Image (cartoon, coloured by chain):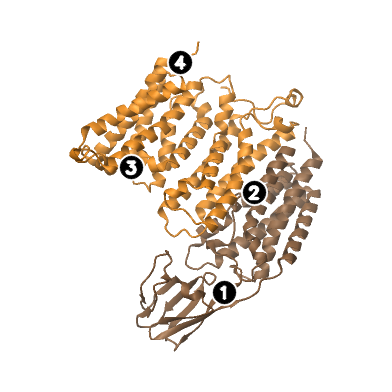
């Protein structure tokens, strides 16, 4: 059992990240926004998408419109771009280094696209760490009973799924399924194992605690890259940032509690023969 | 058929302190989860080579790779836990052959963290640099240790000398995946990735100029690829009387993964390798190479290497409908490979056991 615990502890302490916000978007304190088109162009709209990293211009007018540019404008593929003409009905999405300036302007046809970068201080991460710790203690206490462990696995996994889906929904311009797959990471294994934990609990199998512990450990691994959610204000998540922080705390704390509680249950109940 | 004792060994093991031996089904599941793990790696390798917009560590391909690792790790923990449940303690709970994998799991995980940090702060490799990144080297080494677990199980069972194909399957797949991973990390000198047209072009040059860079690349690649492909067979033939199908399985797995990373451009070459795998299986049956059958062992090493590269050029010639212009290159390369095969055989078994 000690070798087993040591291996699990090493896995938890060192395992590779497997989940974070989808599409490579990261939490940050700044967010670039479009403030307007001056003078307005009929039918043309512009917005910052993908957590303020890309500019999306939709030409709903009847005439082509050129995005005026300097050499530092970079396309989605990373290649430098020259001026681009957006045809009527076309939506053009690109990354432009100029949108990272505190106040920025980009020529758009006969008008100017204007925007700014808002900076919002992040929350005090201590509070979220304390919430995580409380959830860890709660998860550990679930280890007193097999059924509670299974319930805990369902709740923590649901939190993890919600976080993965929410971070996927915020991405514009990419397919949902590959993005969710990338964001799920070890969730590909942990999510189905949750069903195994429930079935084992219903059948009153000792494996319930083992599966709960393994799923808990995997979800800790899944949540490690999301620590930044506790210290930055702007999170790439389709919903309130505090909800995402709570989901991350649930994944990390609940997962840790389930891992500890599950293995404690195994230690207390001992071998079956 | 002897399949070894299942993981839930008799309680007497606790009293005698003997380590259990993983059963056939256990090893088969280990290797199937390793297949998931390996496919994830090859998908990732394909993405690094064919998807120019990789901006994130959190890609579907990394997800398949790391979830494959998580599934394999969870399964090995399950095996240990089952043995613990049977009353086995400490090392006695670790089946024979599984110990290195138990150590390699956290090593792989640590390298995963390192790889994340590397990709985040140093960048994502998209060329030959991917094969030299320190974190990737630790990942691949620990992965090979994990994947070869079923091979160690069978190897350690001295009662198994002439396994059937079914009995050898988990070990054979483990051997094939390990070979594929080694070849993947030598892909700068992997002749299996060449298309028929590239093979013909490489050995077509003006003799007056003394050769060409492409010819040198292919000649060197044949040497490296031949050694990587023939060594696992020679190694396994020392220990087992290999069943028919071993070489074909090796070729199918290696080429299945190789063609995926080459975006399926080298299909004629892949077919050639699989055909030569079948011929090598016939050689295995006819020659029955073994450590104590030194002459046959060496003939097998030569013949297997020769056949591989003779068929390699034949498939390129059939595919393109022409031969390379420099005859001595494409006729000499299989002979050169045969000599290298002989050298490997002599190194592995320098003299007959007395």
Which residue position is annotated with label 4?
B351
Visual hue assigned to chain A: brown
* Tags 3 and 1 on a common chain: no
Label 4 – label 3 distance at C-alpha:
37 Å
Q: Nearer the viewer, residue A157 or B240?
A: B240
Query: Circle 3 marks a residue in which chain?
Result: B
Helix, strand or loop under label 4: loop
Disc 2 vs disc 1: Cβ atoms closer than 8 Å? no
Depicted B125 relative to depicted A48: above or below: above
Q: In which quarter of the image is residue A131?
A: bottom right
From the image, state whether disc 4 or disc 2 is nearer to you: 4
| Residue A3 visible (yes or no) | yes
* Inter-mark Cα distance, 4 to 1: 72 Å
| Marks 3 and 2 on same chain | no
Rendered image: mark on residue A31: 1
Q: Residue furthest front?
A: B209
Q: Give the distance between the C-alpha atoms of the residues marked 2 and 1, in whole angstroms.
A: 32 Å
Give the label, 3 or 2, closer to the camera: 2
Judging by colour alone, the chain drawn in orange in this rendered image is: B
Q: Which of marks 4 and 3 is nearer the N terminus?
A: 3
User: Which label sits on residue A14?
Assistant: 2
Q: Mark 2 lies on which chain?
A: A
Residue at screen point 67% across, 68% down: A243
Classify mark 3: helix, strand or loop: loop
């Amino acid at each position: 059992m000690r070798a087993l615990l040591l291996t699990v502890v090493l896995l938890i302490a060192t395992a590779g990240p497997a989940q974070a916000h989808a599409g490579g978007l990261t939490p940050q304190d700044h967010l670039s926004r479009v403030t307007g088109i001056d003078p307005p162009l009929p039918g043309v709209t512009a917005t910052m998408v993908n957590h303020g990293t890309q500019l999306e211009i939709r030409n709903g007018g009847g005439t082509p419109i050129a995005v005026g540019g300097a050499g530092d404008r970079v396309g989605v593929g990373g290649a430098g771009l020259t001026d681009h003409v957006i045809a009527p009905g076309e939506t053009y999405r690109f990354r432009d280094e100029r949108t990272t300036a505190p106040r920025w302007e980009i020529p758009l046809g006969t008008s100017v696209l204007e925007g700014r970068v808002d900076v919002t201080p992040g929350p005090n991460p201590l509070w979220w760490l304390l919430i995580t710790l409380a959830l860890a203690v709660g998860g550990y206490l679930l280890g007193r009973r097999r059924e509670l462990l299974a319930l805990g696995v369902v709740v923590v996994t649901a939190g993890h799924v919600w976080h993965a889906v929410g971070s996927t929904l915020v991405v514009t311009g990419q397919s949902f399924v590959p993005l969710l797959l990338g964001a799920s990471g070890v969730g590909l294994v942990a999510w189905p194992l949750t069903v195994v934990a429930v079935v084992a609990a219903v059948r009153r199998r000792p494996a319930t605690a083992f599966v709960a512990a393994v799923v808990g450990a995997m979800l800790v691994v899944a949540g490690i890259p999301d620590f930044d959610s506790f210290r930055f204000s702007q999170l790439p998540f389709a919903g309130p940032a505090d909800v995402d922080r709570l989901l991350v705390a649930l994944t990390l704390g609940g997962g840790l509690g389930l891992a500890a509680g599950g293995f404690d249950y195994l230690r207390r109940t001992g071998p079956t023969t | 058929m002897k399949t070894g004792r299942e993981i839930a060994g008799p309680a007497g093991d606790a009293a005698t302190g003997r380590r259990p031996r993983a059963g056939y089904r256990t090893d088969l599941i280990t290797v199937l989860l390793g297949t998931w793990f390996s496919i994830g790696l090859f998908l990732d390798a394909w993405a690094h080579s064919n998807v120019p917009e990789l901006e994130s560590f959190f890609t579907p391909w990394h997800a398949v790779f790391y979830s494959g690792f998580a599934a394999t790790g969870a399964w090995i923990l399950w095996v240990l836990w089952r043995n613990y449940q049977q009353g086995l303690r400490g090392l006695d709970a670790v089946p024979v052959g599984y110990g290195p994998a138990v150590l390699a799991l956290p090593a792989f995980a640590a390298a995963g963290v390192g790889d994340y940090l590397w990709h985040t702060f140093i960048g994502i490799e998209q060329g030959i640099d991917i094969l030299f990144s320190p974190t990737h080297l630790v990942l691949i080494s620990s992965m090979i240790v994990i994947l070869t677990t079923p091979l160690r199980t069978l190897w350690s069972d001295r009662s198994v000398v002439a396994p059937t194909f079914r009995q050898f399957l988990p070990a054979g797949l483990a051997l094939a995946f390990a070979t594929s991973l080694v070849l993947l990390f030598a892909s700068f000198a992997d002749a299996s990735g060449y298309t028929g047209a590239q093979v013909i072009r490489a050995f077509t040059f003006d003799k007056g100029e003394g050769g060409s860079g492409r010819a040198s690349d292919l000649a060197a690649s044949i040497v490296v690829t031949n050694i990587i492909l023939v060594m696992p067979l020679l190694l396994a033939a020392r220990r087992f009387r290999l069943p028919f199908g071993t070489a074909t399985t090796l070729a199918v797995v290696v080429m299945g993964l190789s063609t995926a990373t080459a975006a399926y451009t080298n299909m004629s070459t892949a077919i050639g390798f699989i055909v030569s795998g079948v011929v090598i299986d016939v050689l295995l049956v006819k020659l029955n190479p073994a450590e104590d059958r030194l002459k046959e062992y060496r003939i097998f090493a030569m013949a297997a290497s020769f056949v591989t590269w003779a068929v390699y050029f034949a498939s390129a010639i059939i595919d393109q409908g022409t031969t390379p212009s420099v005859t001595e290159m494409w006729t000499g390369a299989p002979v050169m490979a045969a000599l290298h095969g002989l050298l490997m055989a002599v190194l592995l078994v320098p003299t007959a056991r007395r």
